[in-house]
Image (tube, rainbow, N blue to C red):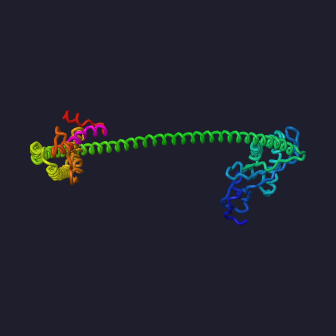
Amino acid sequence: MVWGFVTCGPNEALVISGCCHKKPLLVPGGRAFVWPTVQQVQRISLNVMTLNVESPRVYTAQGVPISVTGIAQVKVQGQYEEMLLAACEQFLGKSESEVQEVALETLEGHQRAIMGSMSVEEIYKDRKKFNQNVFEVASSDLINMGITVLSYTLKDIHDDEGYLDALGMARTAEVKRDARIGEAEATRDSQIKEAIAEEERMAAKYINDTEIAKAQRDFELKKATYDMEVQAKKAEAELAYELQAAKTRQKIKEEQMQIKVIERAQEILIQEQEIQRREKELQATIKQPADSEKFKLEKLAEAARNKTMLEAEAEAEAIRVKGEAEAYAVEAKARAEALIMQQKAEAQKEYKEAAMLEMFLETLPKVAAEVAAPLSQAKKLTMVSTGTSEIGAAKLTGEVMEIITRMPNMVKTLTGVDITKSIRTV
């Protein structure tokens, strides 16, 4: 052996023994100087070893045989000198497979011991507890050999008697039963909850519909109230407008009526003045000449009583000419006063009797003219006198006047109006 430095990897350790060392020098993963011939160098593996720990047909605490397979990770501890030294004492010079066999036998024995102290249900249901027990018991023994148990896991558990299957079947039946019960309960609860939810939904819908109906009703009521107020205000405005317009029209009407009253008053005043003028005119142009003519005729009648009928005929001719003149005058007067009397009749509706009297008086000359008209057409007139009555023109005039005096009775018979009474009242 050549002297010098010797090295090793991190997965192994150097064991140097011989000269200069009371106990072996342990160098895990490094280098060391070695003297040839006087010192010896050996190597020990620090690799992790995976062990498949099988324990077939081990009787548990209940006497049920089961088979268990576990997986363990172990290695020679190189960090602690005492454990490495113990491993060197136990395994130095042995192969890695031999180390694995020793560790496997130790783990398998402890696994069997733990299986015998637990029931099948405990091992099956509480694997963590089983793993912990095996790990702790095996570690306490392997540490003395310098080996550390890194991990232990229960890989498989089975039996040849069907105990686990029966246990599983019972559990499966329980689970199925519980599942069916749970499903039925869930279905029941779901249906109940659905019914409750549907009830709540319908109640909420009814409440919502009721609220909507109430809101719609309130809206319609408020709208109707507002419309009624608007219509009332509009009607009030229209009535106020109509009232104001009526007042304005009434005021205008009153003003117009006042103007018409004033105009009528002026017209009446003018008409009264015109009537007075006409009366004076008639007095001057007709009545006075008529009185004079009457006086003249009376005198002539007295002087000519004994005259012959030829004189009577002459007098009759004179009367006819006079009647024509008077009729013409009356007609002209009637045409002139017709319009005035019409306006006067409208303005003096309340003076009915006076108006009728005035109309009668105005119409009387026309009647006299119509009565005297046949006489005017006579070419020859023979008069007979008893000696006590008038003769000549006076006789004819008296006949006409007698016919005219019968007019009030005729008017009273036809219309019920007493003209003579109205004359006396006036």
Say whether residue 339 is visible.
no
Front residue of 397/94: it is: 397
Quarter assignment of residue 119: top right
Q: Residue furthest bottom?
A: 2
Say whether residue 36 is visible.
yes
**Residue bounds of the magenta highlight:** 400-414
Front residue of 425/182: it is: 425
Position of residue 65 measured from the top left corner of the image (x, y, whole percent): 88, 43
Is residue 401 within the magenta segment? yes
Q: In the rendered view, does 239 fall on the left or right side of 84?
A: left
Position of residue 34 measured from the top left corner of the image (x, y, whole percent): 68, 61
Q: What secondary structure predominates along the stretch shown in magenta?
A: helix
Front residue of 303/417: it is: 303
Position of residue 181 measured from the top left corner of the image (x, y, whole percent): 77, 40
Front residue of 113/384: it is: 384
At 71% from the left and 41% from the top, the residue drawn is 191
At 60% from the left and 42% from the top, the residue drawn is 205
Q: In the rendered view, does 30 fall on the left or right side of 386?
A: right
Q: Residue furthest right?
A: 161
Q: In the rendered view, does 196 fall on the left or right side of 412?
A: right
Quadrant, the C terminus: top left
At 84% from the left and 50% from the top, the residue drawn is 54
Count of numbered marks: 0
Quadrant, the N terminus: bottom right
Is residue 189 within the magenta segment? no
Position of residue 405 measured from the top left corner of the image (x, y, whole percent): 22, 39
